[in-house]
Image: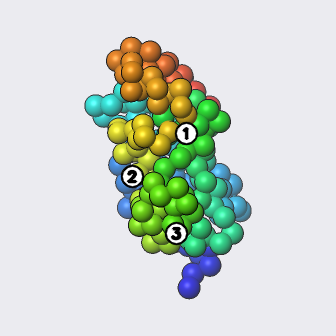
Amino acid sequence: MLTSQQSSEKHSFKLNKNPVEGFSAGLIEDNDLYRWEVLIIGPPDTLYEGGVFKAHLTFPKDYPLRPPKMKFITDIWHPNVDKNGDVCISILHEPGEDKYGYEKPEERWLPIHTVETIMISVISMLADPNGDSPANVDAAKEWREDRHGAFKRKVARCVRKSQETAFE
């Protein structure tokens, strides 16, 4: 079995060799394989289109047996991102049974997941929020009740701010 360090190195090499559309990812510091920075391009035909959102992936020492944590550094208004920037999607939840019965075990973290599968899930989350299981209750309420009004305005503000600060 690969160590977490070997897994991170393998994923980094694979991403550099075969980039995936919609994001870029790499180590924050060359000597720390457990902390990655990702830039996510807001998906086309969504409210997030044109945004350049920075996030960090922090891998546990026992990766790939346990999932990384993902946190947006750029402000983002989304039902599945809490107000501190922490991403809440099934693929990043600890493996096994969901004690609340909401998620199936196969929807949660599995050691076969990679940075690519995580990022594809996050991009999909931006395009199609899960309002039934929100991390940001206020954003979820606005998304359900005023998607084309207050919610859209807040997202547009985040997109503009992300464009201004993307490469700082």
The answer to which of marks 2 and 1 sits earlier in the sequence is: 2
Image location of residue 28, percent across then percent down: 65, 51
Name the residue beneath numbered marker 3. 96
The answer to which of marks 2 and 3 sits earlier in the sequence is: 3
User: Residue 152: in sight, yes or no?
Assistant: no
Q: How dense is the environment of label 2, judged by Cα within 10 Å: few (below 14), some, or many (20 and up)?
A: some
Q: Residue 18 vs residue 79: left or right?
A: left
Give amino acid for label 3: Gly
User: Residue 68: in sight, yes or no?
Assistant: yes
Q: How dense is the environment of label 3, judged by Cα within 10 Å: few (below 14), some, or many (20 and up)?
A: some
Residue at (45% x, 54% y) in the render: 102
Residue at (62% x, 78% y) in the render: 3
Q: Quadrant of residue 61?
A: bottom right
Cα–Cα gap, marks 2 and 1: 19 Å
Q: The residue tagged with tag 2: helix, strand or loop? A: helix
Image location of residue 157, percent across then percent down: 49, 18
Q: Which tag is nearer the camera, tag 2 or tag 1? A: 1
Cα–Cα gap, marks 1 and 3: 20 Å
Viewer-proximal residue among 21 and 129: 129
Residue 50: mark in rendering = none
Name the residue beneath numbered marker 1. 135
Give amino acid for label 2: Ile
Q: Are marks 2 and 3 in contact (CB under 8 Å)?
A: no
Which quadrant is the N terminus positioned in? bottom right
Residue 120: mark in rendering = 2
Residue at (42% x, 62% y) in the render: 104
